[in-house]
Image: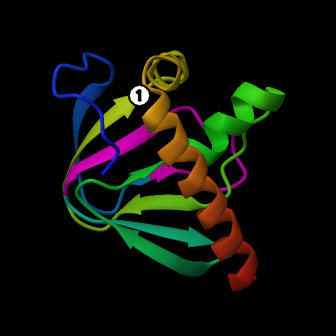
Amino acid sequence: MLGLPPDCELGTQQEMLADRVVITEGRPTRRFVLVVSGELCVCSGGKRLAGIGPGDWCGEIGLIGRLKTNDGRATATVCTKTAAMVISFAPWEFKEMIDTYPEVERRLLASAQQRIERSREAQ
């Protein structure tokens, strides 16, 4: 779990249909997504890396990169496998979230490191 408090007012809840692209590998990341319900699939270089579901997230690698280098390209493509409910965070909301909740930032950095390592192993 990410560990955001229930009273956090950042992000926008969105319903997403199945088989929709959420994030595209190699393109600038425009949002951080926290999955509330449904299943998403993470692929890189045409290979399936992982499935993510309620309580999982995506987009942190690109947005962390965007904060550090102003580039922030996605390292994987994420698509909805089923209809899903997500909370979508714009880049400014993502920055406010990690500035306000240091424990969330630590989880996201650890997650990003593990995902980057897993992606390199899959290539």
Relative height, residue 78 to residue 102 (above, below)? below
In the rendered image, residue 98, in percent from the top left (x then y), is placed at 51, 26
Q: Can residue 93 be seen in this snapshot?
A: yes
What residue is rendered at 70% in x and 70% in y?
117
Residue at 60% x, 65% y: name it.
115
On screen, residue 28 versus residue 37, left or right, reads right
Q: Position of residue 68 (x, y in %)?
A: 78, 29
Looking at the figure, which quarter contains the C terminus? bottom right
Residue in the picture at 55% in, 21% down: 95
Instruction: Give percent across and percent down for residue 67.
Output: 71, 26
Q: Position of residue 17 (x, y in %)?
A: 23, 52
- Residue 13 belongs to the span the image colors magenta: no
Q: Amino acid at mark 1?
A: Phe
Image side of residue 35 versus residue 20, left or right:
left
Depth check, front residue: 40 or 1: 1
SS of the residue under disc 1: strand
- Residue appearing at x 16%, y 28% in the figure: 6
In the image shown, does 91 or 107 lie closer to the viewer?
Answer: 107
Q: Which residues are magenta?
A: 22-37
Residue named by callout 1? 89
